[in-house]
Amino acid sequence: MSSAINETPGKNASEGREEQLCRLVHHLIRKNDNEKARLARELHDELGSNLTAVNLDVASVEDKLKSVDPALAVRLRRALESLRTVVGLSRRMIEDLRPSALDNMDLAEALRGHCEDLAERTGLECATDLPDDLGTLHRDSSIALFTVAQQSLGNAAAHGKPSQLTLSLKADASGTRMRITDNGSGLPDNPFDRLSGHGLLEARERISMVGGTFEIRRGENGVGTTVDVFVPSA
Ligand SMILES: Nc1ncnc2c1ncn2[C@@H]1O[C@H](COP(=O)(O)OP(=O)(O)OP(=O)(O)O)[C@@H](O)[C@H]1O
Ligand SMILES: [Mg+2]
């Protein structure tokens, strides 16, 4: 006879399971982030520095070879170009693995840079309203806000076919508010329930992990989509 724990249906049992699943999701998000950060570090420290060293060596040989054996120098130049492509690729991979922009700049600056990149890549207008001084924000909160901004802007560009995106950030004593809007086609019914994607679920959990709230709805006058995020002060 089996005596399973927590299999009895009932209010307390189901509430307990929901909490456990929530804890599991938060743990998996953290684990995934740590794993990505470790991979990014290794790629940067091992692969990146070795590629840079090879690049410098090959460049200096190519320089000397030009006068001695021009045909060989041309082949070496091609190898050098391929190497530079690989260096660029590894930089992009590192960047995708962790928001390294946050390592050397503050959240507002990193968001501005991200919007500029996105506008350049997609041709969409991406207006920002970011304060000069955000006050002190816990690093986990900065990472959560940055990641959710990336996901939300990515969603707008991918699904909404908008012509314009906006991102604003405001901070007061209670916390930081971030709003992202687009003038695209707007949300389908029950966007959190779509089996094909998990971005919104992840965004909501990331923000709940830092004690905040995540809301997504139709935009003003039914146009496009608005995402509102609030993260409380530490
Ligand atoms: N700004 C938006 N405009 C229009 N539709 C949106 C927008 N944001 C989300 N959606 C809709 O909500 C759905 C769920 O979004 P979600 O980010 O969870 O998944 P996804 O983008 O499809 O996949 P992924 O897991 O790669 O993020 C999308 O498939 C899309 O239909
Ligand atoms: Mg998505």
Image: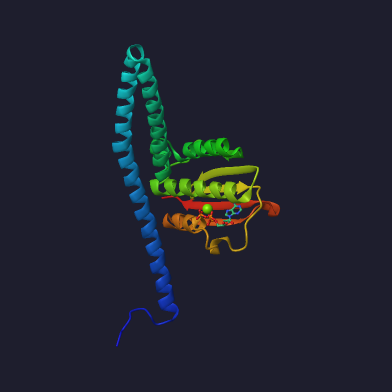
Q: Quadrant of residue 139?
A: top left
Q: Position of residue 225 (x, y in %)?
A: 62, 52
Q: Position of residue 189 (x, y in %)?
A: 62, 63
Q: Quadrant of residue 102?
A: top left
Q: Is residue 4 left or right of residue 212?
A: left
Residue beneath the point at 42% across and 57% down: 209
Residue beneath the point at 37% across and 30% down: 83
Q: Quadrant of ligand 1?
A: bottom right
Question: Quick check: can you spot residue 78?
Answer: yes
Q: How many marks?
A: 0
Residue beneath the point at 38% across and 18% down: 71
Among all residues in the image, which is located at the extreme top? 67
Q: Position of residue 45 (x, y in %)?
A: 30, 37
Viewer-proximal residue, 136 or 202? 202
* 115 is higher (above) or lower (below) than 173: above
Question: Quick check: can you spot residue 176?
Answer: no
